[in-house]
């Protein structure tokens, strides 16, 4: 037990040391470029955010370059700093804010493309589309639009969200990613930015209430198509290909996709800060400022809530699956085998998205409830097999002996088979619980802010990849270690053989 604690402390120290010391190796040779020319990029690697149009922009406009996929701009910039790629590509408005906050990051001119950005609306919702276009025209004519641009897209510190009166009509469901600085991000623990103000102002204009769902960028269009949300905005580029699947409003922003490269800083006038100074600075910026530690706490709470309730559901379902698999009826056995084959063979993130965007697309149940159902259904397949395997390890002779002593079939099961199978299954059963807890890291694909999503939100604001990721990893590690200790304690207390060995 002591060795486990020592390993945890050692791992934490190594993680924090890497965090504080950084690891930037400087930029690639592309950092010496001063202007964008497509012919300069043959064979070079450029980041492309998953779910965006950047890979198509790269292939259409920089055919000699190779797209490398990342989930966020922050991930791409960190890879750029460490020379894993040669450049990042992003919409100019979001990229300017990153350039202003990342010494050495430089945006190339001219833009790769000039693009229009709009709000996504379902094909079937022409009424909402017309109302949004009317609203866009109004705020552009009365000066509100210029005021919003100045407030959120200036590289200086953004001002607080204005006080916007709430409508009283039906509820509008708005989706956003929450990780595009300037447009949709967390400030002082609440969503803010150009897109957020836009959504609130539109709800006030339409005299409707507003419900905001935060989802992965790549899932927002799917959510609009499925009817899970009414409209979405997170700096969507309007393209002809996208317009075949979704409607877009008139452009609410015009900019372009630009490349940025990283140049290692050569100013040696001051001594580089040491480990403790770096750690203190990173700690204050990533956790203390704007009470960002609360995002981690809320994310951990969401992850634990989903894990506990999903595992209860998985346990109940697991007994049912086990019963089907051990039934003497061939049809029931076939149903159980089919269930296990489908659920064990489907990645949990795919099952989660199918459950949220297809099965419960028209339902108003929360994303957390959907996650509990999806994880519970998946876990039932694994728990069912754990229980069945444990039952099969029990010698049938013991059951026969119990029956000969007058026990009924059910009585023999609960007196002889079940207690022994629980002891056999317990270690694997508890490992499944810990595995499920770690797998909740994918629930950010739907409208849930879990522990991993909280780290992504912090990274999008602080432009620091190391500290938020290491913090999230340590929270997972410490929580899982506490679970392991608790389960081992339960095992020691309930296992008669271990108690006798101690005596």
Image: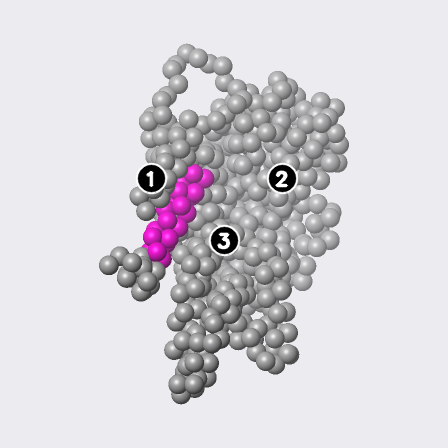
- Comparing 485 with 227, the one in front is 485
The answer to whether residue 215 is left or right of residue 257 is left
- The residue depicted at 45 percent of the width and 27 percent of the height is 22
Q: Quarter of the image holding residue 87? A: top right
Q: CA distance from mark 3 to mark 1?
A: 25 Å
Q: Are marks 2 and 3 in contact (CB under 8 Å)?
A: no
Any mark on residue 6, and which?
1
Earlier in the chain: of badge 3 and badge 1, it is 1
Residue at the disc numbered 2: 69
Spot occupied by residue 475 in the image (x, y as percentages of width and height): 39, 45
- Camera-side mark, 2 or 1: 1
Q: Which residues are magenta?
A: 469-488
Earlier in the chain: of badge 2 and badge 3, it is 2
Spot occupied by residue 60 in the image (x, y as percentages of width and height): 75, 36
Crowding at label 2, few (<14), some or many (≥20) Cα neighbours within 10 Å?
some
- The residue depicted at 43 percent of the width and 80 percent of the height is 401
Any mark on residue 439, and which?
3
- Comparing 218 with 68, the one in front is 68
Spot occupied by residue 204 in the image (x, y as percentages of width and height): 48, 56
Q: Are marks 2 and 1 in contact (CB under 8 Å)?
A: no
């Amino acid at each position: 037990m002591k060795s486990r604690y020592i390993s945890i402390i050692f791992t934490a120290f190594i993680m924090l040391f890497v965090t504080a010391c950084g690891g930037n190796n400087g930029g690639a040779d592309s950092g010496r470029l001063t202007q964008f020319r497509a012919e300069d990029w043959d064979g070079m690697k450029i980041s492309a955010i998953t779910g965006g149009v950047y890979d198509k922009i790269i292939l259409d406009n920089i055919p000699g370059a190779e797209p490398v996929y990342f989930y966020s701009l922050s991930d791409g910039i960190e890879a750029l700093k460490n020379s894993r790629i040669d450049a990042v590509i992003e919409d100019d408005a979001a990229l300017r804010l990153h350039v202003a906050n990342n010494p050495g990051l430089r945006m190339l001119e001219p833009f790769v493309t000039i693009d229009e950005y709009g709000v996504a609306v379902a094909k079937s919702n022409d009424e909402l589309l017309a109302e949004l276009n009317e609203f866009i025209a109004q705020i552009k004519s009365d000066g509100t639009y210029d005021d919003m641009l100045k407030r959120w897209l200036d590289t200086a510190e953004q001002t607080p969200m204005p006080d916007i009166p709430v409508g009283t009509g039906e509820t509008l469901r708005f989706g956003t990613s929450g990780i595009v600085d300037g447009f949709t991000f967390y400030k002082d623990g609440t969503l803010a930015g150009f897109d957020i103000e836009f959504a609130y102002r539109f709800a006030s204009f339409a005299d409707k209430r507003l419900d905001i769902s935060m989802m992965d960028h790549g899932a927002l269009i799917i959510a609009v198509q499925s009817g899970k949300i009414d409209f979405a905005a997170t700096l969507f580029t309007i393209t002809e290909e996208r317009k075949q699947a979704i409607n877009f409003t008139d452009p609410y922003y015009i900019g372009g996709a630009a490349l940025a490269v990283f140049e290692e800083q050569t100013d040696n006038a001051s001594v580089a800060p040491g480990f403790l100074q770096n750690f203190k600075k990173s700690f204050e910026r990533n956790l203390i400022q704007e009470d960002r530690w609360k995002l981690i706490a809320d994310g951990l709470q969401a992850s634990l809530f989903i894990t506990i309730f999903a595992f209860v559901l998985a346990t109940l379902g697991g007994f049912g699956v086990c019963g089907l698999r051990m039934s003497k009826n061939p049809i029931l056995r076939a149903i159980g085998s089919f269930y296990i084959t489908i659920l064990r063979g489907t990645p949990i993130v795919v099952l989660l998205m199918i459950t949220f965007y297809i099965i419960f697309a028209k339902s108003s149940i929360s994303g957390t409830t959907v996650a509990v159902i999806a994880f519970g259904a998946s876990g039932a397949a694994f728990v069912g097999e754990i229980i069945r395997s444990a039952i099969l390890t029990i010698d049938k002779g013991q059951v026969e002996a119990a029956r000969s002593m007058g026990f009924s079939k059910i009585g023999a099961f609960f007196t002889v088979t079940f207690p022994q199978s629980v002891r056999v299954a317990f270690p694997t059963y508890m490992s499944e619980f810990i595995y499920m807890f770690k797998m909740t890291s994918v629930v950010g694909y739907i409208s849930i802010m879990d522990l991993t999503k909280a780290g992504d939100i912090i990274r999008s604001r602080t432009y620091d990849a190391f500290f938020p990721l290491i913090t999230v990893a340590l929270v997972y590690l410490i929580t899982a270690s506490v679970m392991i200790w608790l389960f081992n304690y339960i095992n020691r207390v309930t296992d008669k053989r271990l108690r006798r060995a101690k005596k």
